[in-house]
Amino acid sequence: MKRDIIITFITEFLILISGILVYKLAASFLGKEGFSEYALSRRTISLIVPVLFMGLGVGIPRYIAYASANPKPDNPDAYFLGGIYVLSLALLIFTIILHLLKKRFAFLFFGSSAYTYLMFPIVLVIWGLIVHGLCYSYFRGKLLMFKANLLQILNTGIIPLFAFFFGRTVAMVITLTGVSMFIVSIFFLFMSVRKIKLKKNIIPHTRELLVYGVQRVPGDFGLAALLTLPATFTVHMAGLEKAGYVAFGVSLLNMAGSFFAPIGIILLPKASRIVATKDFCLLKSYVHRLLKVTLLLTVIGIFFFETFAEGIIKVYLGKNFPNLVSVTRIIMISGLPYAIYVSMRSIIDAYYIKALNTKNIIISLFLFLMSSGIVVSFTNNYVYLIFSFVVAIFILGILTLIDVNKISERSEKDNKIQVQGRMS
């Protein structure tokens, strides 16, 4: 497990660097308006993809790992094939709907139907990311982390950078990104599927996967909405440029959270196997160590950024974005609770079939929408929207901690019961 975590940390660190460079290139090659268009496009994609994936990004690795560790004979690959069939249908339906309503989608996400030309490039990226997610989830469930990390670094690390050197407009950059992702992902999908030999009907596995995944769709959509709506509200409230700043700030928060993603990436299948074998003492140990590391690293990181934010933004994007400093400083306050959520959500998903993370996200999103409604009704200052977002993320972090603490307590009780059972 340590080797997998180290390799995954290196991969995610390289992807983090790539994400930083992507916005640097967007600021240099596309100008202020192009930068905002690109940032909003990425936020829009981040909103749509989790909904289309229907919770299977968690369900596929969870059930493959659980079936692999279960003493009863089963076929883990059936969950993967079931996911392919379901997501292919969902992707086809979505593409048709978006094509028919492209002007309305453009107005919703960009504040004007004039941005309809970005809808097709966005669809291409979504196709690439869905196929990517299928393969990545399969590799996670099998704990084939070398293949998972190779796919990850190609699609989310190298390709987004590569697109800027061949595209000169926002639409061209996004189109090249989507087409390249799709080609790479299809190759990995073909190489995975051709080795699978099934002897069972996959319908029961698909149904089981959907029962687990679908109840997580509101949570996936809720989190994507929580990370996207501050920019969406701002574009209608204060214009495209300021909305781009908010979208960038949220993306920066997401990049900071991705520092802890490797832990969750490995921990979901690992914790699922622990739950299958009922080694609750080990699970509790993982929780406590993970929480200590998360708190220490996040506090240090936030202090560093808040102290040197102005210099960091100037070096990063140049001197043309002075208003961006205050926006990112406010958003990054929520780095601590967001890091807690990112690092701990896999424990909750592995332990419970019930979607507790969904409950926590919906509560946080509801509070954000309520406070945002008050802000929009009484002021035109979009900064208050950002503060509403920060409060919502803190609520999410607190609720996550409460659920993780319950798991620790239950694990301790279950462990005592097992020990007493052996003694008797």
Image (cartoon, grey):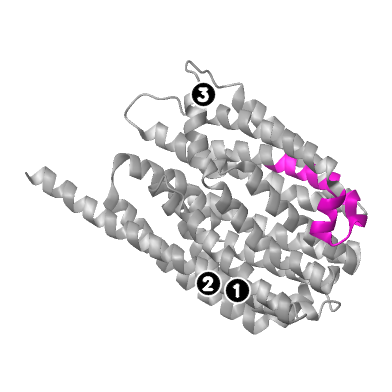
Identify the residue position indicated by label 1 in the image.
Answer: 390
Q: Earlier in the sequence, mark 2 or mark 3?
A: 3
- State which region is magenta: 103-129
Residue 394 - label = 2
Residue 230 percent location from the top left of the image: 70, 68
Q: Is residue 144 visible?
A: no
Residue 203 - label = 3
Q: Quadrant of the C terminus?
A: top left
Whether residue 271 appears in magenta in the rendering, the answer is no
Q: Mark 2–mark 1 contact, CB under 8 Å?
A: yes
Q: Which residue shows up at 80% across the image and 65% down it?
A: 24
Relative to residue 345, is residue 287 drawn left or right? left
Local packing at callout 1 (Cα closer than 10 Å; few below 14, some 14-19, many 20+) is many
Q: Nearer the viewer, residue 378 or 138?
A: 378
Q: Secondary structure at mark 1?
A: helix
Q: Which amino acid is tagged 3?
A: Ile
Q: Which residue shows up at 30% across the image and 40% down it?
A: 277
Q: Which amino acid is tagged 2?
A: Phe
Magenta stretch mostly in which secondary structure? helix
